[in-house]
Image (spheres, helix red, strand yellow):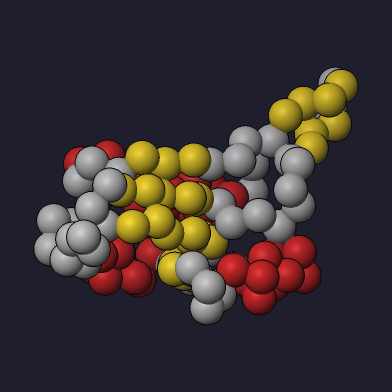
Amino acid sequence: MAETDASEKLFQEAVLHLAQMNGWQHFHPSPAQKRHGVWRTDGQGFPDLVLAHHDRGVIFAELKTATGKMSPGQRVWEYALYPHVEWHLWRPSDLPRIAERLGPKGVPKLR
């Protein structure tokens, strides 16, 4: 695993920890091994996380390291989703803002 992959993995774990602490459900599309040494993720470019909370909405989030760049497939998903749903490109420097959004006062109840 490359260093940037490890950093993104740690960042994702931090975001998921915040989400779980605040009652969010999450989905992360995981790659599947098709045969020895060959991995594939269906939905190429689909955001790294989908977070859902009964009172606080649904968030699609692409996670990148400080210097990570989005792929063309990820850009396609960004343009398909935003501004119709809440979509974010989050980096480790965004953790305070992420904690605020996922926390109990992130968004008032919509009903």
Q: Is residue 5 left or right of residue 35?
A: left
- Residue 19 visible within the image: no
- Image location of residue 87, percent across then percent down: 49, 68
Question: Residue, x 83% and y 25% (percent of image)?
Answer: 34
Observer-nearest of 66 and 15: 15
Q: Is residue 54 left or right of residue 62?
A: left
Observer-nearest of 70 and 29: 29
- Total label count? 0
Residue 79 found in image quarter:
bottom right
Residue 82 found in image quarter:
bottom right
Q: Is residue 73 left or right of residue 109?
A: right
- Image location of residue 80, percent across then percent down: 66, 70
Task: Please tell me whether residue 83 is drawn above or below residue 58 in the rendered image.
Answer: below
Question: Residue, x 66% and y 54% (percent of image)?
Answer: 46
Quarter holding the C terminus?
bottom left
Observer-nearest of 86 and 71: 86
**Residue farthest to the left, as pictured:** 105
Observer-nearest of 92 and 58: 58
**Residue farthest to the top, as pictured:** 36
- Residue 40 visible within the image: yes
Question: Residue, x 55% and y 52% (percent of image)?
Answer: 48
- Image location of residue 88, percent across then percent down: 47, 69
Task: Please tell me whether residue 62 is drawn above or below residue 52 in the rendered image.
Answer: below
Question: Residue, x 13% and y 56% (percent of image)?
Answer: 104
